[in-house]
Image (cartoon, rainbow, N blue to C red):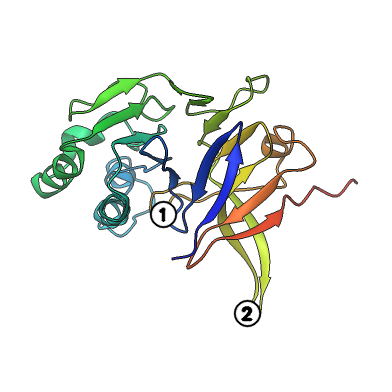
Amino acid sequence: MTDTPFTLCGASLTARPSGALWWAEAGILCVADLHLGRSERMARRGGTLLPPYETRATLDRLEAEIAALDPRSVICLGDSFDDQRVPDALDEPVRWQLGTMMSGRRWIWVAGNHDPQAPDIGGTAMEEVARGPLTFRHIALPRAAAGEVSGHYHPKTRVRTRAGAVARPCFVHDSRRLILPAFGTYTGGLNCTSDALQTLFEDDAVCILTGNATTTVPLRRRESA
């Protein structure tokens, strides 16, 4: 597994190919937008049916990161659940898996727009988390102080391969802020050329692509009309 180390406001961070962020000095593992229960929520509301194993697939990947890194704290950056009813609908094996991962470490659920209320499933619910030079929240604030870490946008960027252009989930950061890719399975994404992302970053911003190994490319700027 090839990681990409980088620095944000003096904090030495690592972008993992899985889409997780590792801050070794602080013992913090951070993930964004798990969207647990997405298939259940869409079926409940009569939407497009998704494979029913997406929650377990997401948790298995998170469990692998925890096993590899043994973090002291885990910060979930909001939209951990696809809506407020999902935590009550989780089956016992999923609850057991979550409880095992939470055991012995601090687990923080940051409030998201899909899950603004604290889940009754263990851990600590917070609006945002300040640790050293960094502040963790769900949605980036346009005028946030330097050191902001957030999720919400599910950033992706298009890259060319032998098979043609494909969209890859990515971290996006400059010297002031970082946005994580969605960690959840079947979460979709927003192209980094969108106005919502372009206006948040300085000209030196880069994308760190996830996948089998991380790769860093410049943030592609939207072409002027």
Q: Where is residue 175 in the image (x, y as percent from the top left)?
A: 68, 35
The answer to whether the residues at label 1 and label 2 have Cβ atoms under 8 Å apart is no
Q: Position of residue 203 (x, y in %)?
A: 80, 40
Q: In the rendered structure, which disc, 1 or 2, sits on the residue that comes first in sequence?
A: 2
Residue 30 in view of the camera: yes
Q: In which quarter of the image is the N terminus?
A: bottom left
Q: Name the residue under label 1.
A: 186
Identify the image quadrant of residue 164: bottom right
Q: Is mark 1 on a helix, strand or loop?
A: loop
Where 24 falls versus 5 (above or below)?
A: above
Q: Is mark 2 on a helix, strand or loop?
A: loop
Who is closer to the viewer here, 183 or 24? 24
The residues bearing labels 1 and 2 have C-alpha atoms spaced at a distance of: 22 Å
Who is closer to the viewer here, 187 or 178? 178
Residue lying at the far bottom of the rendered structure: 162
Residue at 77% in and 43% down: 204
Q: Mark 2 points at which residue?
A: 163
Residue 180 in view of the camera: no
Who is closer to the viewer here, 155 or 41? 155
Identify which amino acid the numbered label 1 is placed on: Tyr
Residue at 66% in and 60% down: 158
Identify the image quadrant of residue 106: top left
Q: Where is residue 38 in the image (x, y as percent from the top left)?
A: 33, 45
Residue lying at the far right of the rendered structure: 225
Who is closer to the viewer here, 59 or 167? 59
Identify which amino acid the numbered label 2 is placed on: Ala
Q: Residues within 10 Å of mark 1 (few under 14, many from 20)?
A: some
Residue at 22% in and 28% down: 123
